[in-house]
Amino acid sequence: MHKYYNILYHINKLGFINQRALAKACNMSVGNINSSLKELVGEGYLIEKDKKYGLSGKGREYLENSLENKQVERLILDSGENSSFVKSAVILAAGINLCFTKPIGLLTIDGLPVIELIMRNLSLHGIENYYIVVGYQKDEYRNYFKNRRNVHLVVNDRYKWTGTMASLSTVKGFIKEDFLLVDANQIFEETAISKLLECPDRNCVLLTNPSDSNDEAYVELNPDNTIFRISKDIKQMNHIDAELVGISKISYALFEKMLDYFKDNQNPLLNYEYVLENIGRIYQITGVMADDMAWTVIENDQLYRKAEKLVYPKIKKRERLRKENHARETLKVCMSVRDEDIEECSIGGGMTNTNFFVKVQGKRYILRMPGAGTDVMIDRKSEQHNAALASSLGINPSTVYCNVETGIKITECIPQAETLNGKTARLEMNMKKTTAILRELHESNMKMYGTFSVKEEYEKYKKQIHEANGVYYDGFETVDKFFYELLERLEELGTELKPCHNDLVAENFIKDKNGKMYLIDWEYAGYNDPMWDLAAHLAECDFKPLEEELFLEHYFQKQPDEISKEKIAIFKICQDVLWSAWTILKEARGEDFGSYGIDRMKRAMQKRDEYVLTYVKKC
């Protein structure tokens, strides 16, 4: 039928025409034209008049249907390539809005800037690198992100006179891979990101039902859910299928097409949505529908209040319920119970994992859901083995379920538990209990799996930082050099390997209603020098010199020897360097720990100076 379309198309274009002229126009032989004309006349597509041929109504209808099909069909960018894992995001935050005295991205909701809420959702789904296009009050953004190593600020100095496509074009040279494109003037549920990333198509835009935000970009879809038209003018739409949310998944190939389309641009106010619409006439850009999503743009004070008072509380509630429902489903599988057996399931805390307080058939448990990326940082088989040994020793609650593949763990809940903090850990009544546990652990004959080597852990983090394109804090090379000097000194002092916990933050000590102390979370447990545990607890709980002296006297049951004291001083510095590197790695993977990592590095430098004064210059 392609031959027929060619003939009908040229007859439509040229009017009634003879065979020889038609053969020339169609680039076909006269004989081929003659046989085709007879068939088309016979089937009613053509009218013959004085040996010239013109279209019938049926012929015009055939052409219309053919053209409609051509308009619906779209090419697929990247169709011959493997799907790309998205780990970067471009956030457009350059614009000025006269309704506010600061950029919308820095307006706070529930104590956090809007852009931080956006980035937290992105980091939950593996986004590690952020390219934020700024303009208006760019120095405010620089100040806010000064300690964030995975955030790259790109400046659009012409933000007053340009649209979002000009802002997007500024990241040319930075982006060389697929990415998520996000507008900074909105808040949304985490599911917005998961829906886009779960879509198998590498080029797609997120859609939802019209929100009545007064700035909607309406969308009309083709029958196959690809983009047909985008417009803020409802009068241009034949039908409205959805509203565009400012979140898209863009392949690098599409980004190059967008830049190519924009390179000769004469209208600096062009927005990227209309570039997508134009490219979408040829290439497939899929609309992904999120029809029940809590979100809003923030374009004026009324919408800002709506975001604060209505939308964000709804987002928090939904996301809490989503996590709790996921925890309930996990419990049903892991404990082989029914939904009605689960009497309570509420989310708790956790720095890298998420813990849930649950009650099943009258008994209380703690469900641990592992955090993103912990599978490459934690040996779950060793954790399971070591935790079981600690439970048999009576210093760790009993484990009900532990899956070394998923990292999911369920432990018995300590009744009427009191979790220590930095202040309560420094009370002498608690020192007596924590030092007693540590002596029992260190002097036990537990056959642990694994050895905790600070050098191996540190170098593992450094390797992963390199792989994640992480950036070290300014001055980190100084503590890095001193770290290795301390390791050499440790070899001179000598170390002894005994069962150790290796993560002695105050919150890992829990006291039950009868005053019995437990030590929980054995993720990092393994053989190590016991002075590491003492140094960790003293540093994490910020013991003052006199409190530290008392704590060590309780542990040793006498005054500690000088070698032990020096090893504790060395291990304090090593831990600050180690956990600073750990934070750099987590930040490279998109998580935010505020100033935690830099504070640890600065403390390492301070402790280095104290160590030099006490031990090096003394020698």
Image (spheres, rainbow, N blue to C red):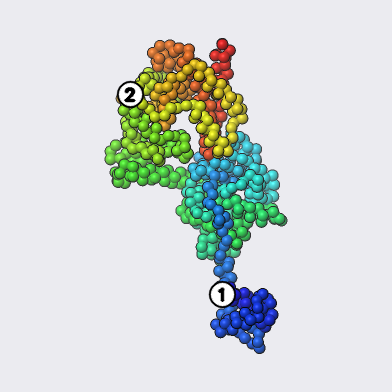
- What residue appears at the point 33 percent right and 45 percent down from the top-left corner? 332
- What residue appears at the point 59 percent right and 46 percent down from the top-left corner? 91
Residue 104 seen = no
- What residue appears at the point 53 percent right and 20 percent down from the top-left corner? 488
Of mark 1 and mark 2, the one earlier in the sequence is 1
Please give the residue where the numbered disc 2 appears in the rendered image: 515
**The C terminus: image quadrant:** top right
594 or 21: nearer the eye? 21
Left or right, residue 94 beside residue 87 = right
Q: Quadrant of residue 344?
A: top left
Please give the residue where the numbered disc 1 appears in the rendered image: 1
**Secondary structure found at label 1:** loop
Q: Amino acid at mark 1?
A: Met
**The N terminus: image quadrant:** bottom right
From what the image shows, is residue 474 above or below residue 549?
below
- What residue appears at the point 51 percent right and 27 percent down from the top-left corner? 455
Residue 175 image position (x, y, % from top left)? 62, 46
From what the image shows, is residue 335 above or below residue 509?
below
Residue 118 image position (x, y, % from top left)? 53, 44
Q: Amino acid at mark 2?
A: Gly
Residues at marks 1 and 2, CA–CA distance in whole angstroms: 87 Å
| Mark 1 closeness class: few <14, some 14–19, many ≥20 residues within 10 Å | few
Left or right, residue 541 beside residue 606 = left
Q: Nearer the viewer, mark 1 or mark 2?
A: 1
143 or 329: nearer the eye? 329
Residue 93 image position (x, y, % from top left)? 61, 45
592 or 501: nearer the eye? 501
| Mark 2 closeness class: few <14, some 14–19, many ≥20 residues within 10 Å | few
